[in-house]
Amino acid sequence: MSDSLERLYDAVVAARDLDPGSSRTAKLLRSGQAKMSKKLAEEAIEVVIDAMNGKADAVVRESADLIYNLAVLWVACGVRPRDVWAEMDRREKMLGIAEKLPKQHRKAPKASSSTPGIAATQPAVIALHARRSNKRR
């Protein structure tokens, strides 16, 4: 699969300089990261809906669209497929290939609590108050 993804990525890079009037990829790349991100999200939602409805053939088609839009976004963000594979390799060494990192591995360590009845794993709450000006107008 990684060879196919590399070929797709290279094709997206090559399309970057094409005429946006004749290349959907060039047009999408010029639309900005917000638009590209929205297209990726739309395709992901379509995959989910088709999966929920038990439409395997539609899941295949929409997954191909999802991967295409992911490759376009990677190009725009300067992310290479090898960067993603390196992260997958790192995770495999930690947890195995079929596991996702728990959320706590990606967040900063949580502060412990000295308040009785509050779990030590809950984050500390810091209240921020606006300064009040004593000046009269």
Image: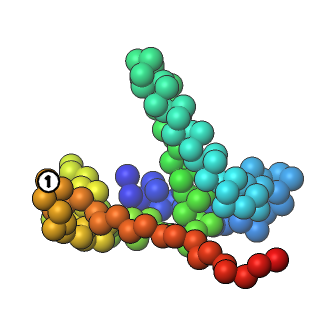
**Image quadrant for the C terminus?**
bottom right
Q: Which residue is drawn at the image coordinates 47% and 62% (left, top)?
A: 6
Q: Which residue is drawn at the image coordinates 17% and 63% (left, top)?
A: 115
User: Mark 1 is on which residue type?
Assistant: Gly
Q: Nearer the viewer, residue 21 or 89?
A: 89
Q: Position of residue 99 (x, y in %)?
A: 21, 51
Determine whether 124 is above or below 100 in the image: below
Q: In the orientation shown, which residue stands out farthest toward the right?
A: 21
Q: Which residue is drawn at the image coordinates 51% and 48% (left, top)?
A: 67
Q: Position of residue 12 (x, y in %)?
A: 62, 60
- Picture quadrant where residue 51 is located: top left
- Which type of secondary structure does the marked residue at label 1 adopt? loop
Q: Position of residue 58 (x, y in %)?
A: 50, 25
Q: How many marks?
A: 1
Q: Is residue 124 left or right of residue 118?
A: right
Q: Nearer the viewer, residue 133 or 36?
A: 133
- Please, which colouring scheme is shown? rainbow
The residue carrying mark 1 is 117
Question: Could one spot residue 106 in this view of the protein?
Answer: no
Q: Is residue 104 left or right of residue 7?
A: left
Q: Nearer the viewer, residue 59 or 95?
A: 95
Q: Position of residue 101 (x, y in %)?
A: 25, 57
Q: Which residue is drawn at the image coordinates 67% and 57% (left, top)?
A: 34
- Neighbours of disc 1 within 10 Å: few (<14), some (14-19), many (20+): few
Q: Is residue 121 left or right of residue 83?
A: left
